[in-house]
Amino acid sequence: MKRVAELTARRQLLLARCAQQRAELGERFAQLEDGPLGWIRAGAAAAATRPGRHPLAWVVAVAGLVLLQRPRQAVKLIGWTRTALTVLARVGEVMGVLSALRRAR
């Protein structure tokens, strides 16, 4: 019973610390809005409302154009990626089996 009380007290302490850090982050973000880096947040908000302004959308568009120009390399890349993902999935399965065997000992 003593251990449960200790854990409950520790949990309350951690929750209080999280609330304090959350309030501190809120204050810092408010300062950034008005400070010299406020334009970054404004740009991120605009990018969220208009997908054409998002930098990742431009990267994907350029990658699509490059792949359309070279279809043979695109197919090769897709095949290589699929093979690599399959190998990684198998390695993950083997690691899971080995981990289960170690725990069984």
Image (spheres, rainbow, N blue to C red):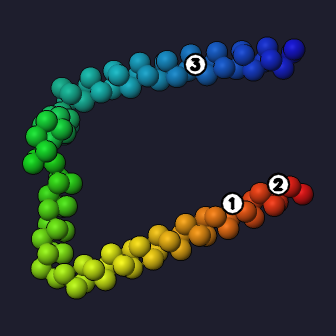
Q: What's under tag 2, amino acid-wise?
A: Arg
> Left or right: 92 with respect to 26?
right
Q: Secondary structure at mark 2?
A: helix
> Left or right: 27 with respect to 34?
right
Q: Earlier in the sequence, mark 3 or mark 1?
A: 3
Q: Residues within 10 Å of mark 3 (few under 14, many from 20)?
A: few
Q: What's under tag 3, amino acid-wise?
A: Leu
- Residue at mark 3: 15
Residue 76, quarter of the rendered image: bottom left
Outermost residue on the right side: it is: 105
| Residue occupying the point 49% across, 18% down | 19
Task: Indicate the quadrant containing the N terminus: top left, top right, bottom left or bottom right.
Answer: top right
- Residue at mark 1: 96
Q: Residues within 10 Å of mark 2 (few under 14, many from 20)?
A: few
Q: Is 70 rendered above or below residue 54?
A: below
Q: Position of residue 89 (x, y in %)?
A: 55, 66
Q: What's under tag 1, amino acid-wise?
A: Gly
| Residue occupying the point 24% across, 30% down | 32
| Residue occupying the point 13% across, 36% down | 49
As measured in the structure, the alpha-carbon distance from the residue carrying label 3 to the one carrying label 1 is 34 Å
Q: Residues within 10 Å of mark 1 (few under 14, many from 20)?
A: few
Q: Tell me the mark number nearer the camera, choosing from 3 and 1.
A: 1
User: Residue 28 versus residue 68: which sits nearer the camera?
Assistant: 68
| Residue occupying the point 18% across, 38% down | 48
- Residue at mark 2: 103
Q: Secondary structure at mark 1?
A: helix
Q: Earlier in the sequence, mark 2 or mark 3?
A: 3
